[in-house]
Amino acid sequence: MSPLENLTAAEESETWQELQEALQAQNTETTRTILQRLDVEDQARAISRLTQENREALPKTLSCQDFAQLLTQLPEAQSIELLESIPGERTAAAVACLPPEISSRLLRELEEEESTEILEEIEDTERLSELKTRLEYEEGVAGSLMRGNPVSFSQETTVRQLLDDLHDHAEDYSDRDIQYLYVTDNESKLTGVLQLRQLFWAPRDKTLKELMIPDPLSVSDQLDFHDLAEIFTKRPFLGLPVVDTEGKLLGVVPRNAVDRETSDEQTELYLQSQGIIDGEELRSMPLIDRCRKRLTWLAPNIILNLVAASVIAANEATLQEVIALAVFLPIVSDMSGCSGNQAVAVSIRELTLGILRPGDFMRVVMKEGLVGIINGTLLGILLGIVAALWKDNFYLGGVVAAALALNTVLSVLLGGLVPLLLKSRKVDPALASGPILTTCTDMCGFFLVLSFASTMLAKLT
Amino acid sequence: MSPLENLTAAEESETWQELQEALQAQNTETTRTILQRLDVEDQARAISRLTQENREALPKTLSCQDFAQLLTQLPEAQSIELLESIPGERTAAAVACLPPEISSRLLRELEEEESTEILEEIEDTERLSELKTRLEYEEGVAGSLMRGNPVSFSQETTVRQLLDDLHDHAEDYSDRDIQYLYVTDNESKLTGVLQLRQLFWAPRDKTLKELMIPDPLSVSDQLDFHDLAEIFTKRPFLGLPVVDTEGKLLGVVPRNAVDRETSDEQTELYLQSQGIIDGEELRSMPLIDRCRKRLTWLAPNIILNLVAASVIAANEATLQEVIALAVFLPIVSDMSGCSGNQAVAVSIRELTLGILRPGDFMRVVMKEGLVGIINGTLLGILLGIVAALWKDNFYLGGVVAAALALNTVLSVLLGGLVPLLLKSRKVDPALASGPILTTCTDMCGFFLVLSFASTMLAKLT
């Protein structure tokens, strides 16, 4: 297979046109052919450019399986957006078609109203009850990540019976990971595991109980995915069996579900640190939703900014005397903010890796304090020299240098500690560390510059 | 297995003490026992608290395999740090012990000098040449992610011969993913693939050529991991065979190597956006390195800040007249910076997902422009009201409102477009978007406030 080539701009706009027309006409075959011709990225781009009317035509035009497949291949944020923009009654069938570990992930992320609507419309009662069970799990625990219906056999099964079953159900198993076979007792409790290849040389009349590796490693359905990730780091397994409190086999968590969860957590961390806090935003979402989501972050921020700037208002007299300070106020506050953000990032990263715990205050103080003193001093001197040369006033340089140095120390200490404090209060550090840090370092920065200046006003004017 | 419990503070400090003593005494057995008793996170914490002397004692004290295992279990950034802090001659043996796909990842991240030293000390010439071949691949291409030595057989092999081979080498295969067997012709070219379970029912004297699925999907060793990720999104494979330009089988890229690469990319994105740009920082790294790495980002930033603030210096006269403006300068620049960063995050995310391409300027302009106008107007009015009420001056409110509104529009446009521009110039958007955006929005923000004010100076004083 050759590397995937993206379409040229001309091919692309032609394809988009064709797709829109096929959907307009609700032409199942053409729509399907166009989508199959596109690679994953081009598919995502095409879907994101559909008119609202044509989006709604998608589930009507495509077969249930094809629409379900599309939902699997699109980026998750886009599948969620697509489901939210189409009435639930039209998408329910496709959602029921999806493997439950995928549909439950999507339903979990949908607006409450939309997911309820979809669940109400699912006709397959077995699938419905499985979905509901899954949705009861908290996000990120083993139960929410597992694949159900593991390939399991009673321990009394003979090798011959097992091989016959595999043969008879070859179709069902064809796209499943059956590296391992799970063995249960007559109460469905997990008692052992078998590697598929062990069966090649096993006498056909032996029972699985005689062959299996007994007491295999299993995890509780309530185990958090960070702990799962830790087990997968230590052991080379491709999947781990999940059991309930009684030891009954519920499913298997595949390694890649845990890897994907880790990746999602990192994505969310990045988005939150940049002020995209209420789930992912895609530009194909409705304008008003996008504005609202962004304002959720911006509006509180404007209040925090006003609080910080009130320090300037309180010291207007000093500023009036030495107007040159106005140049340095934003520099001092911004630079210390940058230093502090670096410390936030290191703390959040160390917390994620488990190297740091919320109680490790002293370690952070020691380690950040030293960096703050060194970097603060260097940056302070740099900025101080600029200030002194510009206004030919040594004291102005001193005020600026001292304020930046001291504020950098405060800021890296705070940046290092705030994530620990938030984490120990069960608040998401990625969400709140930035605004708290910025407000504090702005206030302190303004205060330090203006109050140092006011103590040596005579020398500055 | 019960959920993993972390140690209490008292147990922890006792364990650290024991570990330090065991390493001091170079007591292999005790060191090994202590490390095995700890879970992955506690291990990482313990290693990060070792004295430099005791770190250096690690490879001497642990067996080569145990030290290699430790390197596999620690967070990657920590393994790299550990290798860099110990002379290469002591760690070479353990690095040679690691599976090549892991050791080549680590070597790639080490300082040039350190990795050369390690490579020079590796005695196993076969391993050495394999490592060197791997290191020649660019980071993130299929060749750098694959596992070598796939389980492959000549297409002339009979099922009986194959089963005998599996049986004879059961030990070698025990911890490997042999879901699929790869079939090659007599020139080592990949010609087919077999699912392990197909063999259960195959007549023992058939050749693999008769049974295999011919012409399987394979990828070039030069394929980028984003394209790999796309294939894994579309297909449920656990691994993909990698071939060279002549079609010879080189290895297999496991799905989880691609997932891990995606996760690493997200982590790097977060760290870079927070100003940690030169690789991960851990607080166990030497102080001077940490300061230097952070200054690499801060020092250019101070220059950019000075450039932006020069706009204030050029308009000091206006500011002197209406000192109240000094309160709003940092608010306007900071708030527009926040709005712009949101747009940066959405663009980077859409670029990653492939929904957006570097050439999609008009789409970004349309989609961001509208958000900018709505949010800018709302935030502008909010801040304007505060300003007008505070100084009881309607015109001051107008100046502030107009400046924030206009600057927000500029800033979201710029924030949306800068990542596209950088990407099309092959510059990493995560690295440079933030500073470019902040500098521009600061300059514009200061300029807009001060020039609007100067045009209606009479009304403001």
Image (cartoon, coloured by chain):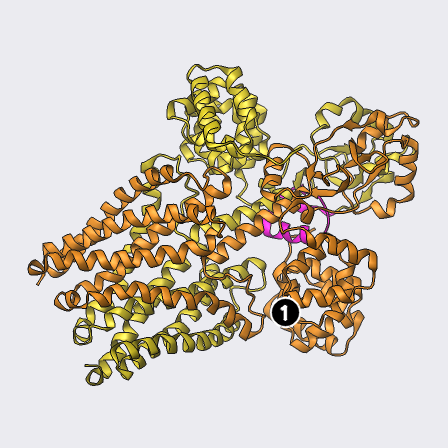
Chain colours: A orange, B yellow
Front residue (pair B284, B92): B284
Front residue (pair A272, B410): A272
Q: Which residue is drawn at 79% across and 36% down?
A: A189
- Could you tell whether A272 is left or right of A71 in the image? left
Quadrant containing the C terminus of chain B in the rendered view: bottom left
Quadrant containing the N terminus of chain B in the rendered view: top right
Residue stretch rendered in magenta on the structure = B217-244
Q: Is residue B242 magenta?
A: yes
- Could you tell whether B95 is left or right of B173 in the image? left
Specify the farthest residue to the left: A458
Q: Position of residue B295 (x, y in %)?
A: 31, 47
- Could you tell whether B97 is left or right of B376 in the image? right
Secondary structure beneath label 1: helix
Image vertical order of residue A59 relative to residue B128, above or below: below
The residue identified by callout 1 is A12
Image vertical order of residue A105 relative to residue A81, above or below: above
Q: Residue B446, located in which quarter of the rendered image?
A: bottom left
Q: Residue at x 79, y 71 (%)?
A: A28
